[in-house]
Amino acid sequence: MQEFLRIAHRGYSARYPENTLLAFAKAIEAGVDMIELDLHFSCDGELVVIHDDRIDRTSDGRGRVAELTLTDLRKYNYNSGMTNCGFVAIPTLAEVIELADNRVLLNIEIKKDPKKKVRIEKNLVDLLKGKDFIDRVIVSSYDCKILTEIKEIAKEIRTGLIYDASSKRFCEEVREFDISSVHPETAVVDAIDLR
């Protein structure tokens, strides 16, 4: 049986501000195999790591990520109310890749955003190729169109389908979209005995 990977969801987010370099560094120190993170575009085309499409919940600022420049985004503190962590900047994906290096894998989730005018996929693939990091990531999404786009740009990238309900065509879709891994919500997973 293949061993489980120890994956830090949004970094070591139980003790440190989620989706920040601090949370990722602490997860690496704790010995994880992979870090899951979330990706958005700033209005000036920077790939920034944050879960929500707005900065309101995790920072002391307000607004949509897609309507703010990286300079604007960096004015705010992303410590998620954990005041003992001091000032915590929003990270770019490039910074996270530098931190991860060869120490951990990354699971990069692209959010489905119908309001998005600019496609994030090509910029992501270009960055991964430029950093020689393609073999160290899984790109995941609830949106099969995003995963298909990733595969059309770079077939070698592993993709993960996140889902919260199984459909009758689920197995066909996994094969059709050349999905490398499936990431179910806990509500759709039956209990299994791993002994």
Image: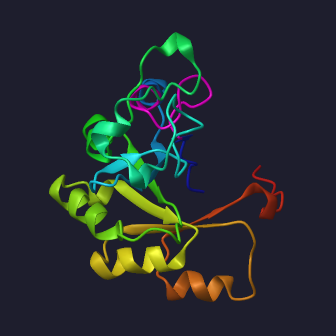
Q: Is residue 23 left or right of residue 153?
A: right
Q: Quadrant of the N terminus?
A: bottom right
At which x and y percent is residue 157?
34, 68
Q: Residue at x 81, y 54 (%)?
A: 193
Residue appearing at x 59%, y 22% in the figure: 81
Callout count: 0
Q: Is residue 102 left or right of residue 108?
A: left
From this viewpoint, is residue 80 visible? yes
Give the residues drawn in magenta, as a range.
Answer: 10-25
Q: Does residue 193 lie above or below 117 as drawn?
A: above
Q: How is the image coloured?
A: rainbow
Whether the magenta-drawn stretch holds residue 168 is answered as no
Residue occupying the far top of the picture: 84
Is residue 91 visible in the rendered image? The answer is: no
Say above or below: 174 vs 116.
below
Name the one closer to the observer, 142 or 187.
142
Name the foreground residue: 63 vs 27.
63
What secondary structure predominates along the stretch shown in magenta?
loop
Q: Is residue 109 above or below residue 8?
A: below
Q: Position of residue 145 (x, y in %)?
A: 48, 80
110 and 163: which is toward the camera? 110
Q: Residue at x 50, y 45 (%)?
A: 63
Q: Viewer-proximal residue, 185 or 3?
A: 185
Q: Position of residue 191 (x, y in %)?
A: 83, 57
